[in-house]
Amino acid sequence: MDNIAGTKSSLTWAVQISVVLLVVLWLIPTVGLLVSSFRDRDQISASGWWLSPFAVEQNFQASIPAEEARKDGEFFVIEGNIFAGGEGEVIRFGGARSAPTAYAPGETADLRRDRTLVVQANGDFVYKNPQEIKRDPNIYYSSSTPPEFSLGNYRTILFSNGMDVAFINTFTVTIPATIIPILIAAFAAYALAWMDFKGRGFLIAMVVGLLVVPLQLALVPLLQLHNKVGIGQSFLGIWLAHTGFGLPLAIYLLRNYMVGLPRDIIESAKVDGATDFQVFTKIVLPLSFPALASFAIFQFLWVWNDLLVAKVFLPSNSESWVMTVKIADDLLGSRGGDWGILAGAAFISIAVPLAVFFTMQRYLVRGLLAGSVK
Amino acid sequence: MSPLVQGLLTIFIGVGGCVGYFFLSNLILDKVIFPARAENPGLNINRANLVRPWLFLFPAMAALGLYLVYPVVGSFWRSLYNRSGDEFIGFGNYATMFSDDGFQVALFNNFLWVLIVPASATFLGLLVAQLTDRLKWGNIAKSLIFMPMAISFVGASLIWKFVYANNADIGLINALRDFFGAEEPLDVLQVRFWNNFFLMFILIWIQTGFAMVILSAALRGIPEETVEAAIIDGANPFQVFFKIKVPQIMGTIVVVWTTITILVLKVFDIVYTMTGGNFGTEILPSYMMSYMFRDDGRATAVAFVIMIIVLPVMIWNIRQARAEMR
């Protein structure tokens, strides 16, 4: 429409470019995490992930065995290959720790006390010393390691760090905490949408008000209550808590949707003798599927991603950590410097929500719109 | 019993229990208490219909009452007691809290968050919504910008920990600084005051997609005639946007703005994972968590302060809802 009056070309280009820039800016951090999760610790600290498709230059130190020395004229000589049969390419080399990359391959390095060292690009070296060689001499070199991606981080994190337990725990918390509120809310939403009774307006207003009550308020009194009735910090406790906290949005979304259903269908069913229970289960519930799906996705994402409720209502031991708690309280502390492990763990925890997000985006958007725009 | 089995059992019992409750309670109401075939069936049906809504509502209202209404009162009551909860100290917790430096920092930072995050996210969302409106690949762009919504705050924090890393070979920020000739890498999360903005950007990154989706739908809903008329009258694209479109979706902008504001007051995850509240980045929710399990009196007092900040929005929401119902 903006094009109608002929304001096309230059502005359109500006729009295209700025959208590309924004999208790239928005994606870069996540892409960085994904790429890093496939690189090992040394690679991550050797070069940025944005250089990961290229070979990495790293410094190495090789010790050559003194007992292989043979007498050649007036020198003791050691010959061999620093890669010891492996592959590699020497970029620079040196014979002293203070100058590990002083010489180019093929050059002769004159070291202290008349010793010399030559290293070829393929790793062949010749070391000459006028005195007898007693200790193993060191060769310093820089070599490029080809780009390498592996699943090592995922293997470590899943099989030796207890992330598998956390993953299962997250599932265990999420599924009941998604299904049960839907069921309870659906009945309440039907009553608030299609049944006439005193106090309906007040209840709707209350639900709207409860939508914004900060969760923080609920933590202390409810934990005390759970302790008193014997639930304590347990899975049962967190299911109940998530059910309670999810209900206002569930009732609100579902009621908004159910109110919009055509009155004729419901009234003609009632005229034909259907009870409210039948109208609800046979007509309203199937018709409300899109709204049910929207809320299910919301609640799933919310519970899966939650840290606060899990920290408070689940016991704080490694058997019952969910992934968010595991990452925030355990890995960031004990593995703080191990970026590869952290990236792998983060990606395991966001993989499921991302899959849900991209397959069910339609319903998510619809739910958002029903929740805020009328 | 493994938690997984326990979970399956809970689904079974929970779902079965709910269905059973609704089915049986309706059955009992219709067949036993007010059967439609007694002396006066009409009266009985009417009576049953008076009771039925409450059968439908009971589980939800009980859960809401217990998990959201009771805590408001319970928290306030608890905040009037001392740390161990056995001595009534009136507003003592509030008094010590307000004179605590940590709380003042948290309050000030929270004020910054509330000011900046909703404004930036709404503005960026509106910008993206408008820019992608006529693009052929607009939906792909929107879906990518919307993506962070699916990521947990903890996950997002980790993602940004990489970007902010104090090492030119890991963090993009320091790599850029290095590229432009900076000598030493800088830990941006330890730069006083400005580190707050780096943390806020994470939440803006997440919430822009939300604002964009809703505002994009609102832009689509604008009657085309108004825009056409403006163009015919010679308005340039910027005038069309600011003088025709924005005023028409002002209501939606306010809704998005307040929704994000409420969210800002709840999110403790980002500060907790990124800095643990150190280096002057504490905000109220994270300040509260640092007292949780240690001093419940103080923790509930902080929670109640958050509640009071939210209160105006709550009242406004309720009034909107009531106005709509009429």
Image (cartoon, coloured by chain):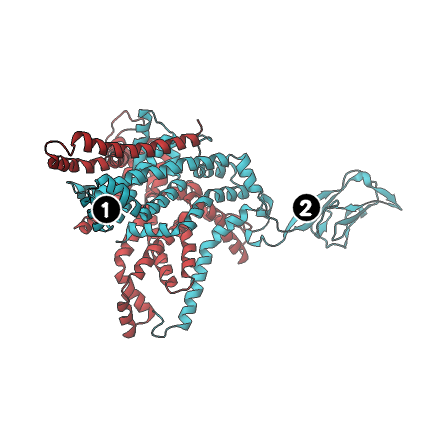
Considering depth in this image, is A200 or B54 the residue closer to the camera? Answer: B54
The disc labelled 1 sits on which kind of residue? Pro
State the hue of chain A.
cyan
Residue B312 is marked as 1
Horizontally, residue B305 falls left or right of residue B36, namely: right
- Residue B222: image quadrant is bottom left
Horizontally, residue B35 falls left or right of residue A338, namely: left
- The image position of residue B172, as x and y in percent, is 51, 53
Considering depth in this image, is A55 or B325 the residue closer to the camera? Answer: B325
Residue A315 is marked as none
Which numbered mark, 1 or 2, is in the foreground of this view?
1
Location of the N terminus of chain B (image quadrant) = top left
State the hue of chain B.
red
Residue at figure coordinates x 20%, y 48% from the top left: A268
Residue B305 visible from this viewpoint: no
Up/down of B142 relative to A247, above or below: below
Up/down of A240 relative to A59, above or below: above
The disc labelled 2 sits on which kind of residue? Phe
Mark-to-mark CA distance, 1 and 2: 64 Å
Q: Secondary structure at mark 1?
A: helix
**Badge 2 density bin: few <14, some 14–19, many ≥20, Cα 10 Å:** few
- The image position of residue A280, as x and y in percent, is 25, 42
The reply to whether discs 1 and 2 touch (Cβ–Cβ < 8 Å) is: no
Considering depth in this image, is A43 or A77 the residue closer to the camera? Answer: A43
Q: Secondary structure at mark 2?
A: strand
Up/down of B149 relative to B277, above or below: below
Residue on which disc 2 sits: A60
Horizontally, residue B17 falls left or right of residue A112, namely: left
Considering depth in this image, is A343 or B61 the residue closer to the camera? Answer: B61
Residue A222 visible from this viewpoint: yes
**Badge 1 density bin: few <14, some 14–19, many ≥20, Cα 10 Å:** few
